[in-house]
Amino acid sequence: MPATSPAHPRRRRRTNRLLVTAAGVLTVGALAAAALPGSASAGEQGGKGHGHGHQHGRYQDVQLLSFNDLHGNLEPPTGSSGRVTELQPDGTTKTIDAGGAEYLATHLREARKGNTYSITAAGGDMVGASPLISGLFHDEPTIEALNKLDLDVTSVGNHEFDEGAKELARLQNGGCHPTDGCYTDTKFQGADFPYLSANVLKEKTEKPLLKPYWVWKKKDVKVGFIGVTLEGTPNIVSAEGVKGLVFKDEVETINKYAKELRRKGVKSIVALIHEGGFPASQNYNYDCDAPGAGDGISGPIADIAKNVSPEVDALVTGHTHNAYVCTIPDPAGNPRMVTSAASFGRLYTDTTLTYDRRTGDIARTAVKSANHVVSRDVPKAPDMTRLIAKWNTLAAPIGNRAIGYISGDIVKDGTESPLGDLIADAQLAYARTLDPETDLALMNPGGVRASLTYAASGAEGDGVVTFAEAFTVQPFANTVNLQTFTGEQLIQALKEQVSGSNEAAPKILQVSDGLTYTLDLTKSGADRVVTDSIRLNGEAIDPSASYRVATNSFLAGGGDGFTTLGQGADDLVGDDDLKALEQYLTANSSAGSPLAPPAADRITIVK
């Protein structure tokens, strides 16, 4: 069992940092490495798939530890968000509880031992949509935790823009929150690591908002990192969060700065890309390359990987919350590693980059990588325990308050989810206190961040929903907005779930009680929403009639590709959506009469 490493003393900004730590317990290895010229293969040199064998002479192994989409999950995430599925040698699967900063710190510190050339990088969404312990304090606790984890560099994810560019700059540079002030006697110091976002430009100057790249150096070894945010960020965050910013193509941007790095003598390059793919298996340790290079992953990152310059040696990705370690050939036909470590700190990726001192480049045929579980069977890192306790003490008076009772898990999973229905019902009920003529409510699936679990997360008791748990479900501080639409617009909005920008990856809105329709997945595009099946309280939607619709402010701004929902009339802005959920739970449940999970039977799905 790994031992806990002593906490590192706090260090401020650094451009060159040496990480001296170690090869630890591996969970599963993946991807065999080809032999280097005149040497044993990385697999033969390293134990259990690490491949950290080349330490002298021409070749030097550089350890790259990476993770992505932490979303402020300092405490172990609950439910399915805190588990991974592991494929066993006999073909069966095993579910493992995973995640939590106390365990992530221990695993990373163990993994670094014996690897004097070690870098830790992240693929974005370190903050945003965070649980109460972090979100209540504008994610300062997570930045403090990442500093203690010795994170070297990260790309910027879309959620880093949830509170806008100025707040992102504060997370980087420090300072008290402009509205809420300082939370402790110590001024917030900001991130010790650089945030990179090469493709996000200031609209007025056309200059990058943040650093486009960063170079890690140790002795004669140099590795450059280029960070990019998914180009589609403006479609999935609030308009206010990206105001005055332009998001450029990921491939063009990476290729541009790869050339610049090579001109400066940096030939070993890693791209940190907050965009991802969809693996062929949900088992974190599946063999992505088994059917043939790249066949085990689809989605945006596959196309990006095929077009990013061969000058880039590895791609660390994120955004889709999936786990994969895949080889996808670069445009020159050479193998290149593409990795993602799921989300919420449940996994980390350990990649060996074998640096060729003669060329200054990575010997691509020797790259070896695997995802590893952040299991909870290791000692907790004491410094993380202290950090979590400090912030929990501040959050407890707010977070521990009971706001409702449930009789079983209310999950967010599924095309139509029980929790999605519950939230839509809550927003409809709240909207009717503002306007009794409100007809229905629609909720975006991406705004439902976690399930409500029956098992107690603390001392509150089973079935009790605390404010902290509800905050984890809806952490965005969106408002509930009312708008008037014609029936024709309402039908069009439902069709936008499966057409336009959502055709390839449908975003199925969660609907309030009374709205029903059929979703025929055997068809394509907008035809998948069967127009004649759409009913409100049993009556067909009248294209020429007016309907009062409640949505959150994100959808009311046309987010997630629902442009029609941004075109309503007679806008009325209410309170935040979390308050609507709290009021609904309080009004409709008690200890003696808990709320049962909704049946999730409003959308009839044909497959």
Image: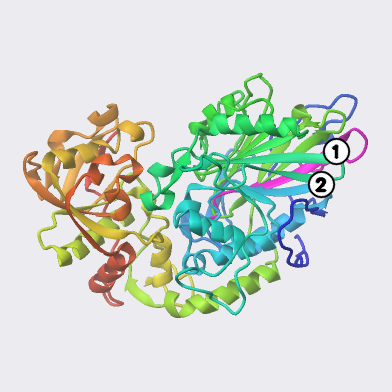
Q: Image quadrant for the C terminus? A: top left
Whether tag 2 and tag 1 are in contact, CB under 8 A, the answer is: yes
User: Which numbered marker is on residue 117?
Assistant: 2
Q: Nearer the viewer, residue 454 or 303?
A: 303
- The image shows residue 60 at horizontal and vertical percentages of 85, 38
Local packing at callout 1 (Cα closer than 10 Å; few below 14, some 14-19, many 20+) is many
Figure check: 419 above or below 470: above
Residue 34: quadrant of the picture: top right
Figure check: 535 above or below 335: below
Q: Nearer the viewer, residue 12 or 412?
A: 12
Relative to 57, is 384 on the left or the right?
Answer: left
- The image shows residue 480 at horizontal and vertical percentages of 26, 59
**Which amino acid type corresponds to the residue marked 2 in the rendered image?**
Tyr
Q: Main secondary structure of the magenta part?
A: loop
User: Which numbered marker is on residue 60?
Assistant: 1
The residue positioned 65% from the left and 74% from the top of the image is 386
Residue numbers of the magenta segment: 45-71
Q: Image quadrant for the N terminus? A: bottom right
Instruction: For residue 595, say whether it is visible.
Output: no
Q: Earlier in the sequence, mark 2 or mark 1?
A: 1
Q: Nearer the viewer, residue 540 or 453?
A: 540
Relative to 206, is 12 on the left or the right?
Answer: right
